[in-house]
Image (cartoon, grey):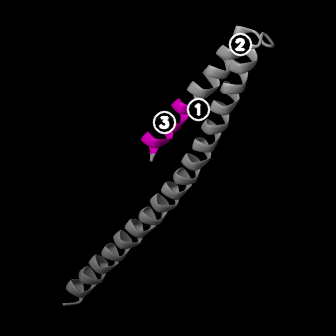
Amino acid sequence: YNAAKIYAEAQDEAVNVTLLTITTDLASNYFNIRALDTQLELLQEIERLRKRTLDLVRSRYEAGLVSYLQCLEAEKAVSDIQAEYQETVRQR
């Protein structure tokens, strides 16, 4: 009887440890998702600003004020942030 009682108590503790582990993992995943959501919002804003910059650089290029290289750099900046956004979506 004593051995059975000790075994049952050990099983109860194992269940409690498992529940605690699952709860901890859930909380950790929740906060990771929230952080990624915030990062996605920031990346969208950066993309919007980089597209605006690209439009300005293109206008300046058409007016002969900047080189084509500067247009390419602005396009690359937009492309880079879009790739970072997609990677963050994948992580989420």
Answer left or right for 76 relative to 17. Answer: right
Mark 1 or mark 2, whichever is nearer to me: 2
N-terminal of the pair, mark 1 or mark 2, is 2
Q: Amino acid at mark 2?
A: Glu
Q: CA distance from mark 3 to mark 2?
A: 33 Å
Local packing at callout 1 (Cα closer than 10 Å; few below 14, some 14-19, many 20+) is some
Quick one: label 2, few (<14), some, or many (20+) residues within 10 Å? few
Residue sitting at x 75%, y 9%: 67
Q: Residues within 10 Å of mark 3 (few under 14, many from 20)?
A: few
In the rendered image, which quarter contains the N terminus? bottom left
Secondary structure at numbered mark 3: helix
Toward the viewer: 18 or 29?
29
Q: Position of residue 13 (x, y in %)?
A: 34, 78
From this viewpoint, which residue is outermost toward the front? 63
Residue type at tag 3: Glu
Secondary structure at badge 2 equals helix
Residue 70 drawn above or below residue 3: above
Dominant SS of magenta comes to: helix
Task: Decide if residue 39 is on the left or right side of residue 59.
Answer: left
- In the image, the segment drawn in magenta is 81-91
The residue that disc 3 covers is 87
- Which mark, residue 62? 2
